[in-house]
Image (cartoon, rainbow, N blue to C red):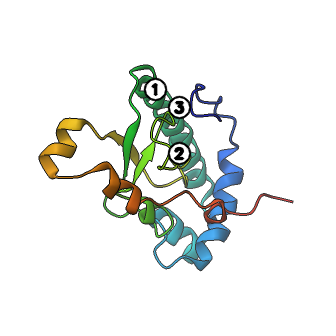
Amino acid sequence: MSRTEGPPPDDRDWVAEIDRWTERFRSVDDPPAAFARALRDGWDSGDREILAIEAAEYARTTAAYIEQLRTADVDLVRFDCRLGSCGVCVKYSGKAYSLRGDTPDLPPPPPLPICPACRHTLNMLTPFFMQRTGVEPEDLVAEAQPFDEDDLPAPSA
C-alpha cells in the first residue's frame, strides 16, 4: 500500500495466518500466551476460531483508525505495544514512523496487526508531545526500526 492511499480490504485468512504464526513462534523466545498454550498443548479449534475473529476485527478497526489519521494529515506516529507483546512485535515498540511519507527519513509503519495475538497501535507524535518530552525529529530518525518482512511467517506452499 502506498502511504497516501487508504488501507486495503482485510482479506487475510486469519485461521491460516494463525497456523503460520504458530510455526513462526516455535523459534521466538516470548510468544503471546495463546500461542504459547498452542505450542504446548495444540490448538483447540474453538480457541483458534476466536483468535481469528478477534484478529480480523482488530485489523478492521485499526485500518479505519489509520485512515482517520491520514485524513487528518497526521504523519508522525509511534508504534506502541501492550505489556506482554510477543518477541516479534516488541522490537518495534516506541519507534517512530512516517504514516504519509512527509518525513522521508522515517520508514512507513509495520502492517497492523503484525501477528494475530498482539494488540499494538499507532499513536500520534504531535509537536506538543515532542516538545514536552524533548524529542527532536533527528532522535526519531536515529532510533528508527524499519519493518523487517523476515519477521512474518513464511507463506503457505
29 on left or right of 48:
left
Is residue 81 visible to us here? no
Q: Earlier in the sequence, mark 2 or mark 1?
A: 1
Instruction: Give the tally of numbered discs.
Output: 3
69 on left or right of 36:
left
Q: Residues within 10 Å of mark 1 (few under 14, many from 20)?
A: some
Give the spatial CA distance, label 1 vs label 3: 16 Å
Residue that lies at the very extreme toward the left in this rendered image: 132
Amino acid of disc 2: Pro
Q: Nearer the viewer, residue 13 or 132?
A: 132
Give the spatial CA distance, label 2 vs label 1: 12 Å
- Placement of 97 over or under 25, stated as above or below: above
Amino acid of disc 3: Arg
Q: Nearer the viewer, residue 16 or 72?
A: 72
Q: Earlier in the sequence, mark 2 or mark 3?
A: 3
Q: How far from the left and from the top, in percent, is residue 119?
A: 42, 49
Q: How far from the left and from the top, in percent, is residue 68?
A: 42, 23
x 61%, y 76%: residue: 26
Query: What SS does tag 1 mark?
Result: helix
Mark 1, residue position: 70
Mark 2, residue position: 108
Q: Which mark is residue 60?
A: 3
- Placement of 116 over or under 34, stated as above or below: above
Q: Earlier in the sequence, mark 1 or mark 3?
A: 3
x 54%, y 52%: residue: 114
Q: How far from the left and from the top, in percent, is residue 116?
A: 55, 52
Assign the C terminus to one quadrant of the image.
Answer: bottom right
